[in-house]
Image (cartoon, helix red, strand yellow):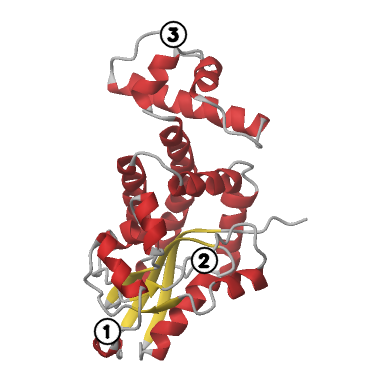
Amino acid sequence: MAIKHRAVLAEDKQERHHAILDAAARLMVRSPERVANVAEVADEAGLAKGTVYLYFPSKEELFLALHERNAAAFFEAMIGRLAEPEPVTLDFMLALTRRHMVDNPLYLPLATRCFGLLAAPMPSEAGAAFMQRMAARMRDAGQDALRGADAVIPVPLHPAREWRRGFNQAELLARKLGPPAVHVLCRTRATPPQAGLGARARRLNVRDAFALAAFPRAPGVARWANALGRWDTRRTAAWIQDRVLVLVDDVCTTGATLDACAAVLKAAGAREVRAITAARAVRAPR
């Protein structure tokens, strides 16, 4: 339903914000194979194109906000259940995941598109803000995985990809989870994207793609030093010894990347390796 009056009160602005997201959702349900542009969203919402830009500076930020709204419903349901005294069962988690991620026709297609948007050129502030809000939800929902952890370890990007993108989404998530984020891993080769690969191909793709970082404190592009050449990593391995570490990534599909990273940490002497991700890809039943 279009909102014709000018939004002045906070309640009106919030209502208009959701009306724009509702319009974008309707367009995506009708045409899941494409992402509507701002003009189409404005027309669907009964608003001027400029009004949409007042709420969402770009198409990318609009669809990130729509995905965030979907994800918030999932996290709120999970956190509410975790607050209850009864233990959480596997059946509950499967039902929750199905209800929010499989039965919702928007969740998985939109999640895939949004992580693709983060990999493409877009305002880094928008991507960083989105990741920080997702990290807050991960911290609340992943308390068991984070409890007693010595550090969180972001899954590294290859320096070339991080330079093109401007940030590593796993690092942005890791920084906000509580335990110190430590860069003890590096990506030694630029692997092709995992999207579209089967489980076996994914594991082959990341085989020997990760190693200990000789310079964990190296900032930004200086991390090239970790990926180039063979350095002495004994100090990094000594730090890892007998620690409880939590790997952090944006999405888990088959677990191939997390398994490859965990193998390096375990070989270096980590006592326990856990993992936490912002999203888990679920195959819809055929």
The image shows residue 22, relative to residue 147, as above or below, that is above
Q: Which residue is mark 2?
A: 191
Tell whether 281 sits left or right of 128.
Answer: right
Report the residue at 46% width, 83% height from top.
Answer: 263
The location of residue 66, given as percent across then percent down, is: 47, 37
Q: What is the number of callouts on the image?
A: 3
Q: Residues within 10 Å of mark 1 (few under 14, many from 20)?
A: some
The location of residue 76, given as percent across then percent down, is: 43, 50
Q: Which residue is mark 3?
A: 4
The image shows residue 208, relative to residue 250, as above or below, that is below
C-alpha gap between disc 3 and disc 1: 60 Å
Judge by depth and name the residue closer to the eye, 63 or 122: 122
- Name the kind of residue labelled 2 in the image: Thr
Q: Residues within 10 Å of mark 3 (few under 14, many from 20)?
A: few
In contact (CB < 8 Å): disc 3 and disc 1: no
In contact (CB < 8 Å): disc 2 and disc 1: no
The location of residue 18, given as percent across then percent down, is: 44, 28
C-alpha gap between disc 3 and disc 2: 50 Å
Report the residue at 35% width, 55% height from top.
Answer: 163
Q: Secondary structure at mark 1?
A: helix
Whichever of labels 3 and 2 marks the residue nearer the N terminus, that label is 3
- Name the kind of residue labelled 1 in the image: Thr
Tell whether 133 sits left or right of 193.
Answer: left
Q: Nearer the viewer, mark 2 or mark 1?
A: 2
Whichever of labels 3 and 1 marks the residue nearer the N terminus, that label is 3
Q: Nearer the viewer, mark 3 or mark 2?
A: 2
Q: Which residue is mark 1?
A: 236
Q: Secondary structure at mark 3?
A: loop
Q: Secondary structure at mark 2?
A: loop
Q: Residues within 10 Å of mark 2 (few under 14, many from 20)?
A: some
Q: Quadrant of residue 94?
A: bottom right
Q: Quadrant of residue 201?
A: bottom right
